[in-house]
Image (tube, rainbow, N blue to C red):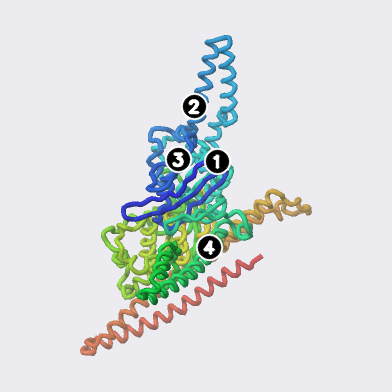
Amino acid sequence: MLSCSGVGVTLGARRLFADVTLRFPPGTCAALVGGNGVGKTTLLRTLIGELDPDEGVVSRPKDLRVGWLPQDVVDAVGASSTVLEHVLSGAEHLTELEARVRSLERRMGEVDGDEQQRLMTEYARVQDQFTSLGGYEIEAEAHRVLAGLGFDPADASRSTTELSGGWRVRVALARLLLAKPDLLVLDEPTNHLDLETIAWLESTLRELPGALLLVSHDRDFIDATADVVVELAAGTTTVYDVRSGNVAAEEGGFASFVAQREERLASLRAAKAQQDRTIAAQERFVERFRYKASKARLVQSRIKQMDKVERIELPDRREVVARFAFPEPARAPRVVAELSGVTVRYDDDTVLDDVELVLERGRKVALVGPNGAGKTTLLRVLTGEAPIAEGEVRLGANVEVAVVDQHQAEVLDASRTVIEEFRTALRDEHRSMNHRSMLGAFGFPGDLADRLVAELSGGERTRLGLAKAMASPVQLLLLDEPTNHLDLASRDVLEDAIRAYPGTVVLITHDRHVIRAAADAVVEVDRGRASWFDGTYEELLDRRRSTAATAATPPPAPARRQGSDPAIGTNGTNRRREAEHRNARHQATKQLRRDVAGIERELSAVEGSVAELTRQLADPDVYTDGERVKGLVARHGEAKDRASALFARWEAAQLALEEAEAAYDVAP
């Protein structure tokens, strides 16, 4: 069993943590949480022996098998082996046992008598150990683990050099899971996994016989795996049991951790208040009688008592309470973007196939689906970066698009301060806003806005990239894995920002809590298709569970009446009718939607002309030329009349569209 006592680490002049005492018994899972930059990864590396502590002791049994998945594991994946070979290399203990079995078989044929009997006894023991550890099924187990992590059977023979960074991380994780070490240590294991793979990993980790220590900022993942939560804050660790109690049973382990932490902080604040009052009384006594000889002994006694008091320190959490007040973007049409029959191919591979999608003003939409299903491609279609083979992409009139991807933090200028870098993203009309207030909402209050970008952690850089993208709101904001490297407090900031953002947001993330908190619609992207679900992620999961239960216990077939369709009343027919209904609704309203979009574009152009003519008429110098004034006034009146007529047409077209859609929605 791994344990540590009084461990502390100092980097330069900064003391990361001290007096850390932990133990990791077999069969338990500990989740290590804390803000970006507090030293979580350093603590992991100290525990497994990559770093020596500056103080304290780490106890590791000599025969303890430790599996370690760092965040930068990509370079450690074998460059000359196949996927299967690299995964099987994790079971070195079984390879050694197998070699021992083969050696004993050979030697038994070379000797006789007592020596042969001794070798046979040893052979039976080693073979039994090899069998009990699953040695004969190890390759089948390797294939099962790879399948659970999203690999196709054919991928087993691929060279690891052909894989992207995210898939190499999965290979490294598969190797560790196959090895089944005594202690498995994972640093942000869900960063490169899709939702289905995360769910598979949760169930797999729960079945491991050894101990598990992980760093994660995914609440749902912690809920599913952790028995204890270890919080690293204010330079030390606090351990919380999150499997027992009413809160854990009703709301989950992470909610139990939060509740216990708040109770502990409340007790700590009360104890500190009492201690402060006691110390203040002692200080008043010392100050009052400091110069009286008759009280000198008492004064010295009180001073010594105060020197011995261990002062209670409250953790300086600097929890961010985000209050967002985004500037309003330019007026957006009801339909911000629309994809009609969009197909995208790369070489001979169809990534998106006949996708129909309508994004409306103000919606917060989450894209979910397996890695490689086309979620990022769908975002790139909306920005015009991905060429489409068939179909049409239409943005509403005046709709501007901004993108925040997982590499956003890498393009920041490290030589600038936070506030200088933030200001580079502001438009002229937004330069008068309170920049420090906005940065404070994104976790850079006060002096933190004056830090150099070079000094920021990965999570802080991601937050700054988000602040830049959202400071001058556009009508359509696309977020591709923005939660990578964000700690729990920063993810809360992201959730609040998405909810408060005045435009339409399309979000790709593997964090189920962020999806539940921020999205009001879900689009499932899989096998080239994109399926819209108008509801929350939790409602989608409920529907899936209900559908699975119905499929598991199908109702009895209804009695067939003469002349009736044999499929009437079946789920397949209902789904087919729903699909036909949606398609008919889309086809019937397609021209109306195009009419609305066309009028909106024309109205936008005319309103621009009215604004320009108004600006010219506001210039005093214009009125020195009578003929020019007459012409401007006439053109201004015509433009206003044209705008008024177009607006009336837009209202009529919009009403017709809404009535047509409503008629299809209520149709039997």
Q: Pointer 4: what residue?
A: 264
**In the rendering, at what x and y percent does residue 579 appear?**
60, 57
Secondary structure, mark 2, is helix
* Residue type pointed to by label 3: Ala
The reply to whether discs 4 and 2 touch (Cβ–Cβ < 8 Å) is no
How far apart are the two marked residues, 2 and 3, measured between alpha carbons?
20 Å
Quarter of the figure that contains the C terminus:
bottom right
How far apart are the two marked residues, 4 and 2, measured between alpha carbons?
49 Å
* Residue type pointed to by label 2: Glu
Secondary structure, mark 4, is helix
Q: In this view, does 96 lie above or below 302?
A: above
Q: Which of marks 2 and 1 is in front?
A: 1
Asked where in the image residue 295 lies, by quadrant, the reply is bottom left
**In the rendering, at what x and y percent does residue 488 appear?**
47, 59
Q: Pointer 3: what residue?
A: 172
Q: In this view, does 133 lie above or below 479?
A: above
Residue at (43% x, 45% y) in the render? 57
Counting other residues with Cα less than 10 Å from the Cα at mark 4, is it few (<14), some (14-19), or many (20 or more)?
few
- Residue 96: assigned label: 2
**In the rendering, at what x and y percent does residue 428 appear?**
30, 72
Q: In this orientation, which residue lies closer to the viewer: 196 or 464? A: 464
Secondary structure, mark 3, is helix
Counting other residues with Cα less than 10 Å from the Cα at mark 2, is it few (<14), some (14-19), or many (20 or more)?
few
